[in-house]
Image: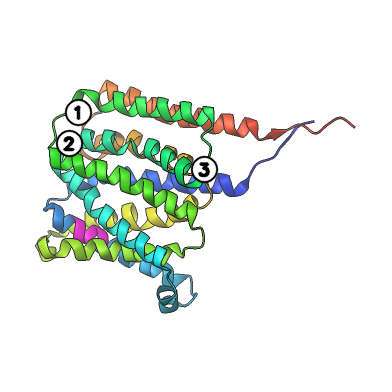
């Protein structure tokens, strides 16, 4: 009789990465719902996210300030690097079309796979490579008819995000001893400090305050709690591949929030991405089955 043998850490890691991608998929619609400039949006998203993460560090009761004093140079680098990336992320979504941002950022799995192979010597299995290509094809199909309507600056910011986030994934995988939550607090506060000189923090409306709280604490803060925990447990290329859930679900949030029905391309492309990830996970589950030899 066969029995299922699986790696519970891998399963848990995949679930956390998928959860983080689910939260990230809300970025596009929240950017549209908040009626303020990109710098004010970036400030509040970063500041509230950093505050949420600081409370998460304090909740762990492991010595709040001692953990920041003990943060390694790599941890500080990662935090500052991600802080810069968060600024580029909002600039991408506010200076180009959602379609352009989605498709450009969706090349992240390809960049992460290449970086993981070059830096970590992580082999890319054939089924993983196929899943990457098919998923990227699904994202491309989703937004191809809308691509090209954005600005060069916004497109450049989206490309920067894709490259910078590949570095983040590889760094977390390479330096597994980084105390990641304090590093993510640094990321939030770095983003807030970088955007503050051009922001108008007290110009927001009460309605925008609610959206910004969701943006900062949920889409940014909670997503990073899940992501940093899961990224330690999952191979680099899988982390990036699961992140494509963000692109597949983003049009659904627009539909729910503002009644903008996704077009046929969005529905088909999103189904391709989610279906590919489901088949990939099922295939990996089947490979984990071990049939013990007959006595």
Determine which residue is flagged by label 2: 97
Residue appearing at x 28%, y 59% in the figure: 83
- Labels 3 & 1 near each other (Cβ < 8 A): no
Establish if 32 lies above or below 172. Answer: above
Question: What are the residue bounds of the magenta stretch?
Answer: 42-46
N-term-proximal mark, 2 vs 1: 2
Determine which residue is flagged by label 1: 147
Establish if 187 lies above or below 275. Answer: below
Q: Nearer the viewer, residue 18 or 74?
A: 74
**Left or right, 126 with reference to 210:** right
**Labelled disc at residue 118:** none
- Labels 2 & 1 near each other (Cβ < 8 A): yes
Query: Image quadrant of residue 59?
Result: bottom left
Q: Look at the numbered disc 2 and give the secondary structure of its residue.
A: loop
Main secondary structure found in the magenta portion: helix
Q: Is residue 198 magenta?
A: no
Say if residue 259 shows up in the picture.
no
Query: How far is mark 3 from mark 2, CA to CA?
Result: 36 Å
Determine which residue is flagged by label 3: 121
Query: How far is mark 2 from mark 1, CA to CA?
Result: 8 Å
Residue appearing at x 35%, y 65% in the figure: 185
Residue appearing at x 52%, y 41% in the figure: 122
């Amino acid at each position: 009789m066969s029995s299922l043998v699986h790696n519970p850490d891998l399963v848990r890691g995949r679930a956390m990465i998928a959860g983080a991608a689910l939260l990230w998929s809300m970025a596009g619609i929240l950017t549209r719902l908040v009626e303020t400039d990109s710098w004010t949006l970036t400030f509040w998203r970063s500041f509230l996210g950093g505050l949420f993460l600081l409370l998460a560090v304090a909740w762990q009761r492991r010595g709040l300030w001692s953990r920041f004093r003990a943060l390694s140079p790599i941890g500080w680098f990662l935090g500052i690097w991600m802080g810069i990336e968060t600024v580029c992320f909002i600039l991408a979504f506010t200076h180009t079309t959602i379609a352009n941002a989605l498709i450009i950022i969706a090349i992240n799995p390809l960049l992460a796979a290449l970086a993981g192979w070059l830096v970590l010597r992580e082999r890319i299995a054939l089924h993983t490579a196929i899943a990457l290509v098919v998923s990227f094809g699904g994202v491309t199909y989703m937004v191809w008819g809308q691509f090209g309507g954005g600005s060069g600056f916004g497109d450049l910011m989206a490309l920067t995000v894709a490259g910078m986030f590949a570095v983040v994934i590889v760094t977390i995988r390479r330096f597994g001893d980084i105390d990641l939550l304090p590093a993510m607090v640094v990321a939030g506060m770095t983003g807030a400090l970088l955007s503050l000189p051009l922001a108008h923090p007290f110009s927001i409306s009460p309605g925008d305050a609610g959206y910004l709280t969701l943006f900062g604490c949920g889409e940014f803060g909670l997503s990073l709690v899940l992501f940093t925990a899961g990224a330690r447990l999952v191979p680099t290329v899988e982390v990036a591949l699961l992140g494509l859930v963000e692109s597949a679900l983003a049009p659904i949030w627009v539909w729910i929030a503002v009644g903008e029905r996704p077009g046929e391309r969005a529905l088909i492309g999103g189904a391709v991405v989610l279906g590919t990830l489901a088949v990939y996970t099922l295939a990996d589950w089947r490979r984990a089955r071990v049939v013990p030899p007959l006595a």
